[in-house]
Image: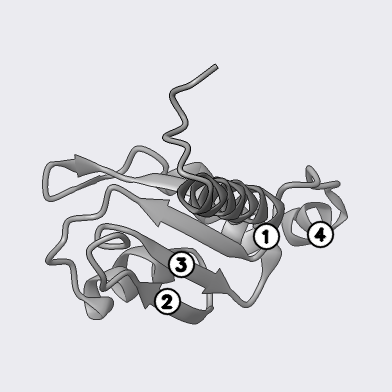
Amino acid sequence: MAFAQKRNTRLPPEVNRVLYVRNLPFNITADEMYDIFGKYGALRQIRLGNTKDTRGTAFVVYEDIYDAKTAVDHLSGFNVANRYLIVLYYQQAKLNKKIDQRKKEEDLRKVQEKYGVDGKEA
């Protein structure tokens, strides 16, 4: 009975199967990630950040959206090697805004260089 009720629950719009995890220990392994996140349902994929800018982060993809919601509910603030996990729903629109902002800043810098403006004049 509880399973049928779970499936009929209306989820908030930000809920999806892809989670973005921050504040991970830099030395965490994929196996450890599967152990932690696999307790909440079948996993499709885990991608650990492996560059200077992405270390300590990961994307976790669940097969089922309800399992992803359960993982967020239980693992946000979970302590791993004295670090508290930040588990969020991945939101492509927010990432696109950051990328767009970086591109605008880069374009502005190029124009300033081209015309010899240092950006500090008003």
Residue placed under numbered mark 3 in the picture: 59
Q: Are marks 2 and 4 in contact (CB under 8 Å)?
A: no
* Secondary structure category for the residue under label 4: helix
Residue placed under numbered mark 1 in the picture: 66
Residue placed under numbered mark 2 in the picture: 46
Q: Which mark is residue 56?
A: none
Residue 86 x, y percent position in the rendering: 39, 43
Q: Are marks 2 and 3 in contact (CB under 8 Å)?
A: yes
Give the CA separation, mark 2 to mark 3. 6 Å
Give the CA separation, mark 2 to mark 1. 17 Å
Residue placed under numbered mark 4 in the picture: 7
| Amino acid type, callout 2 | Ile
Residue at the far top in the pictured view: 122
**Residue nearest the viewer, comparing 101 with 36:** 101
* Secondary structure category for the residue under label 2: strand
Residue 27 x, y percent position in the rendering: 12, 66
**Residue nearest the viewer, comparing 22 with 94:** 94
| Amino acid type, callout 4 | Arg
